[in-house]
Image (cartoon, helix red, strand yellow):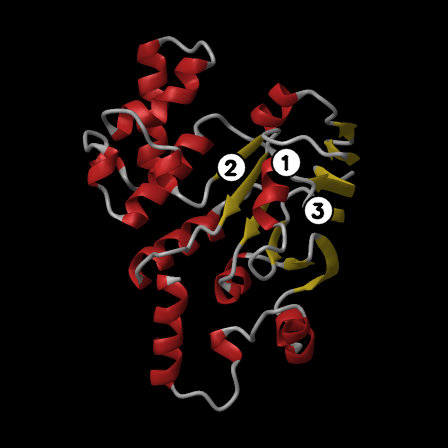
Amino acid sequence: MFVLEVRNLRYAYPDGTPALEGVNLALEPGEKTALVGANGSGKSTLLLHLTGCLGPDSGEILLDGRPLGDDVDRARRMVGMMFQEPDDQLFMPSVLEDVAFAPRASGTPPREAAEKAAEMLERLGISHLASRPPHRLSGGEKRMVALAGILVSDPEVLVLDEPSASLDPRSRRMIIATLQCMKLPMILATHDLDMAMDVCSTATILAHGKSVLRGALPELFHREETLERWGLELPLSIRPGESSEERREGEKTILSA
């Protein structure tokens, strides 16, 4: 049984513009899969459906084999999402309070919630940030704190929207190492195909609101003609004839995009 399955999902924005036009996706227990596509392909919109933030016009989403329907609370319990902008998730005076927010909101006593938050910060190696205000953190630190705030609620599936966006190389490596060690099934929506290969075993290409191709990694990302057809480029690590200096410049471009 799939832990998460999307069947022929369709959705149009309120003005009638199509966003998703028949997306299919399946995630097995323990699987880490990348969701890739050019800007406007529907990646973020799909993730918002998986967390119950948006409802489809047609099609269905199944969690543990059960249709999600209108059970938004079940989606929010089972699926933890890291948004593209961590500032959208961080709003409490301190990191510890931020990570403790979700347990407290679900009824956990304040002291127990703080203990759970402290344990999660320790698990992710960022306990030294506990007393810091979130707005004083670096981009990489904010993403790690946002991740702690998701994991403290024990989700069954993790979805991440562009987790390497605007990160410096060191912070990017930190996020990659953290995701590599995790056992949770996850969907990683990203333009960073090198990161996708480092973290994921499979990938689905989205184009014009449709899932057009799924395959194993890294094999799928070696198909230059296929990637170009859907508005993507070869990962930096496998571009032929490119010098180390050119790769570093390309990496800077991706990280600053």
Callout 3: helix, strand or loop? strand
Specify whether 246 is left or right of 156. Answer: left
Residue 60 appears in view: no
Q: Residue at x 29, y 23 (%)?
A: 97
Which residue shows up at 42% across the image and 11% down it? 108
Among the 4 quarters of the image, the one containing residue 85: top left
Q: Is residue 221 visible?
A: yes
Q: Which residue is mark 1?
A: 50
**Residue type marked 2:** Met
Q: Residue at x 48, y 25 (%)?
A: 153
| Residue drawn at 28 percent across, 40 percent down | 126
Q: Earlier in the sequence, mark 2 or mark 3?
A: 3
Up-down: is 102 above or below 85?
above
Q: Of 36 and 148, which appears nearest the observer?
A: 36
- Read off the residue under disc 2: 81
Counting from the top left corner in percent of width and height, residue 114 is at 31, 19
| Label whose residue precedes the other's in the sequence (2 or 1) | 1
